[in-house]
Image: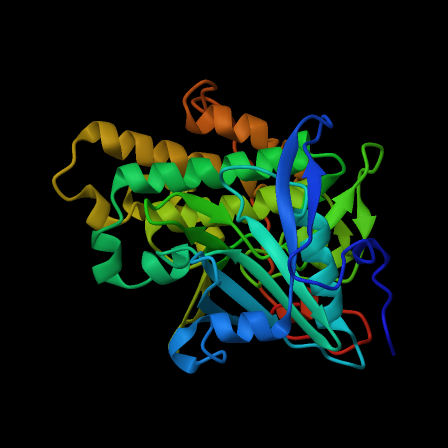
Amino acid sequence: MKMSLPFLQCFCSTSDEKVVHKDDKGEGEAKKFKLFSYNELKVASNGFSSKNKVGEGGFGSVYKGQLSDGTTVAIKVLSIEIESMRGEREFISEIAALTDVQHENLVNLHGCCLEGAKRCLVYDYMENNSLAHRFLGCEQNRKDFSWTQRKKVSLGVAKALAYLHEEKKPHIVHRDIKASNVLLDQNYNPKVADFGLSRLFQDDTSHISTRVAGTLGYLSPEYAISGRLTRKSDVYSFGVLLLEIISGRSAVDFDMEHGEHFLVDKAWDMYNRECLVELVDHLLLKGYDERLKAEAVWFLKVGLLCVQENTKLRPRMSVVIKMLTDETSVEGVKISQPGFVADLMDVKINKKKSTQTF
């Protein structure tokens, strides 16, 4: 089985030629896209050495590399499943989403390798890895995750999604917003990455029906159950991420005695008991004043607004930005019950094989 890649046929076979894309208004140069040879990337990564490996996902591994011009990059080597072509679909989706987007909070795609069955993607290298790796989870790491940094990361991801959902045409739904897909540069600026599951939406499209894909804990319930994907599915995932950033807790925790614990459920319970401040990361509150506590609780409420079960009640990402910057108040705004997927049996999975990241 071979999948046609018509939109890549304009790329020449040599690594020296580049394709120039214009911005959304058709004005000026947006970025240059390069077609790399496999050998060029192999040399850059020292033979895809394990010492250069910086990450691994559902569709392949990521290596640090240095190009011949001295540029340090991240090289994603995709694993192509011949029967299902899942890796090929991810490759196509990522290129389609990133070749003509430009935003300070989106990872920059330099180019790709399309050589035989080999598929690679080349990005900017992010010195501080991912949000999940650098800050969340480990208490020692969270000590260094200041309130200023948490605000910057939260707002940066919100801006990236607002751009994809409302400014970019066709609109893009990421479909897998989570801590491990938020990368951090040398100044801890967030860059949303991994567009392998993304989908394009035309202006007149309210939703699309598709195979459920994403990560348990971040999946919006209406999408997980029905397969109907909307931009509000990303809003839900962002809400979970925001709760993680402020609380320092994972979207889903597990212990032998009590089983799985869902952060969304925990936040809702504490909100109803009017003790939401207790969900704020205790490391964040040490030595800080009441103003920070109030601001942290404010962010948690925005997170809860994003994960409401009724999709019509979830704010658009542009509104979320206004809430996070205090342009729009959340005081007095009624927050309704959130939805979450507590059982994998509730997830609509098609007849083909599926994995933890659906």
From the viewer's perspective, tell me whether residue 119 is left or right of residue 141: right
Number of marks? 0
Place of residue 149 in the rendered image (x, y in percent of width and height, measured from the top left): 31, 41
Which corner quadrant holds the N terminus? Answer: bottom right
**Rendered view: 92 above or below 57:** above
- Say whether residue 58 is visible: no
Residue sitting at 12 percent across and 40 percent down?
Answer: 287
- Say whether residue 239 is visible: yes
Q: Front-most of 56 and 119? A: 119
Place of residue 336 in the rendered image (x, y in percent of width and height, measured from the top left): 56, 37
From the viewer's perspective, tell me whether residue 207 is left or right of residue 299: right
When asked about the image quadrant of residue 204, the answer is top right
**Rendered view: 56 above or below 288:** below
Q: Front-most of 124 and 328? A: 124
Place of residue 4 in the rendered image (x, y in percent of width and height, measured from the top left): 87, 65
From the viewer's perspective, tell me whether residue 121 is left or right of residue 200: left
Which corner quadrant holds the C terminus? Answer: bottom right
Residue at the farthest left position = 287
Place of residue 110 in the rendered image (x, y in percent of width and height, measured from the top left): 58, 53
Residue sitting at 38 percent across and 31 percent down?
Answer: 298
Q: Front-most of 339 and 140? A: 140
Q: Front-most of 64 and 349? A: 64
**Rendered view: 260 above or below 312:** below
When asked about the image quadrant of residue 86, the answer is bottom right
